[in-house]
């Protein structure tokens, strides 16, 4: 008999809708998984067992009365610890916010509650989502390797089968990087698609909230439940929320997918990842998509532009906090925040101009080449041992492993376009990796459609991490 936790979000949603299982059964299954996997994965900052049981009981009563709110009704999910949850401790991975109880939910959380989702717990993140410290969380794929930041607990929880999905945040790749490392599907939607009100900011002009799941359809369902215009968020877009699952089965015949090789298929790309992503490209061509070789020399300015913006905006947010509580910051986090105060306004403005230059170039390529999406590896490496994150690359490439992890991801934050990481392989050392699709603004539906065409031909989403497979 299949364990409930081995089913995907969309599968348990269908069973809930058919009345074949209850939300309370799902919560209890997740709590049993937490008991088994937490000593290994350490995904959770706060396990909400009692609250989840109460919410599940309400959901079951509503559905029994014929009042099903939608596909997320009764489904347990995890929430990253930098996302406000009313009356539930939200510490953003920092002693600075120890014991903080928000008096309201983040809009993405209130949207999910309105959709009937059940919060199973708050999951770990790097301090203030900066990725400068390493929480106790470990990747079930290899306990000695980096599990991906800053949505570190989100990836571990979904991988450990202790939640059916989780919310992460992404300023330069913090949804897509842990998704690639943990064999998950992770979406950074269009800037403004999901409200960031009630989310502790890293850099407000780059921040995104998004879903991390095991399958593409799961991801589309979760995004649909959390998205929507929010008047409380000045960055929120007034865009209708479509049914992201409506065209999943439509295939890719006739779609045009761009591939840029100079920047993304460089010498530092792991050979196994190169081979697998080339196979993905070839498969899309066989499925009827047209592969278009593109050139984007402006990519070379994206890393400096993003880091400058992050430093300046992050420092502005923390200006008061760090003066009052500097001793409570992790030293590495404090160094980043203080460094931001040294960024001149002229450099910040130049970085925003560089950002516009890159975005305009990318949009021009999309328009001139009539692209539906672009495709490249999510990361140039699979992951790295924890004790080598800041060491020089063994292959001689002039970057550290942790620095190279976001090399392929931060350009999508600068452009504000939807970007999705999709599993596509496992190295000989047993480490998962993925490819990344970037789509047109507010066209997440086409990105999901392209991703699903690949996923339905493969079984990566069924693979179980070794550290939890036999628990």
Image: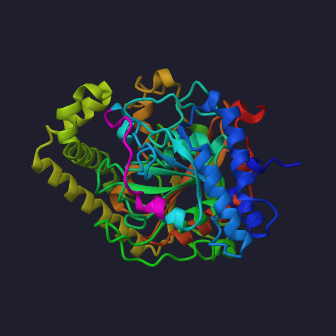
Q: Position of residue 377 (x, y in %)?
A: 53, 49
Q: Is residue 453 visible?
A: yes
Q: Nearer the viewer, residue 74 or 51?
A: 51
| Quadrant position of residue 414 | bottom left
Q: Residue at x 35, y 31 (%)?
A: 95
Q: Residue at x 10, y 50 (%)?
A: 346
Q: Nearer the viewer, residue 5 or 254?
A: 5
In screen coordinates, is 457 left or right of 414? right
Residue 407 belongs to the span the image colors magenta: no
In screen coordinates, is 420 left or right of 403? right
In screen coordinates, is 67 left or right of 151? right
Residue 100 belongs to the span the image colors magenta: yes
Up the image or down, 225 lies above or below 469; here it is below
Q: Position of residue 141 (x, y in %)?
A: 65, 34
Q: Residue at x 54, y 67 (%)?
A: 225
Q: Quadrant of the C terminus?
A: top right
- Looking at this view, name the residue that lies furthest to the right: 1
Q: Position of residue 288 (x, y in %)?
A: 66, 71
Residue interval drawn in magenta: 96-110
């Amino acid at each position: 008999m299949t364990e409930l936790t081995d089913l995907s979000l969309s599968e348990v949603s269908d069973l809930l809708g058919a009345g074949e299982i209850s939300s309370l059964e799902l919560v209890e299954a997740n709590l049993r998984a937490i008991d088994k996997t937490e000593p290994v994965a350490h995904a959770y900052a706060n396990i909400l067992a009692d609250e989840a049981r109460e919410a599940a009981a309400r959901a079951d009563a509503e559905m029994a009365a014929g009042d099903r709110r939608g596909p997320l009704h009764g489904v347990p999910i995890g929430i990253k610890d930098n996302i406000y949850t009313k009356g539930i401790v939200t510490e953003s991975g920092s002693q600075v916010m120890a014991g903080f109880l928000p008096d309201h939910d983040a809009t993405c959380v209130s949207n999910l509650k309105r959709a009937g989702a059940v919060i199973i717990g708050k999951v770990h993140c790097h301090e203030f989502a900066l990725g400068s410290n390493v929480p106790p969380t470990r990747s079930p794929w290899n306990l000695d390797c980096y599990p991906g930041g800053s949505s570190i607990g989100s990836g571990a929880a979904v991988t450990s089968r202790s939640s059916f999905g989780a919310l992460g945040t992404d300023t330069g790749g913090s949804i897509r990087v842990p998704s690639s490392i943990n064999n998950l599907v992770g979406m950074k939607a269009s800037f403004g698609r999901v409200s960031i009100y009630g989310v502790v900011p890293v850099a407000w002009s780059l921040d995104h909230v998004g879903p991390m799941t095991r399958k593409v359809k799961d991801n589309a369902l979760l995004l649909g439940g959390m998205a929507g215009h929010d008047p409380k968020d000045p960055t929120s877009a007034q865009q209708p929320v479509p049914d992201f699952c409506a065209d999943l089965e439509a295939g890719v015949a006739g779609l045009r997918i761009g591939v840029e090789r100079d920047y993304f298929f460089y010498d530092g790309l792991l050979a196994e990842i190169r081979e697998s992503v080339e196979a993905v490209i070839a498969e899309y061509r066989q499925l009827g998509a047209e592969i278009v070789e593109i050139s984007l020399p402006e990519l070379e300015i994206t890393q400096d532009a993003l880091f400058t913006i992050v430093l300046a905006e992050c420092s502005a947010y923390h200006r008061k906090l760090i003066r009052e509580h500097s001793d409570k910051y992790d030293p590495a986090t404090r160094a980043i925040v203080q460094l931001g105060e040294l960024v001149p306004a002229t450099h910040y403005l130049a970085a925003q101009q560089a950002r516009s230059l890159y975005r305009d170039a990318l949009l021009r390529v999309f328009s001139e080449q009539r692209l539906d999406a672009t495709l490249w590896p999510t990361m140039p490496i699979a992951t790295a041992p924890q004790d080598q994150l800041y060491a020089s690359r063994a292959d001689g490439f002039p970057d550290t492993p942790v620095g190279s992890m976001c090399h392929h991801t931060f350009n999508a934050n600068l452009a504000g376009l939807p970007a999705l990481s999709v599993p596509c392989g496992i190295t000989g050392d047993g480490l998962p990796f993925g490819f990344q699709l970037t789509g047109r603004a507010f066209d997440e539906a086409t990105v999901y459609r392209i991703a699903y065409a690949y996923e339905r031909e493969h079984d990566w989403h069924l693979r179980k991490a070794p550290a939890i497979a036999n628990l």
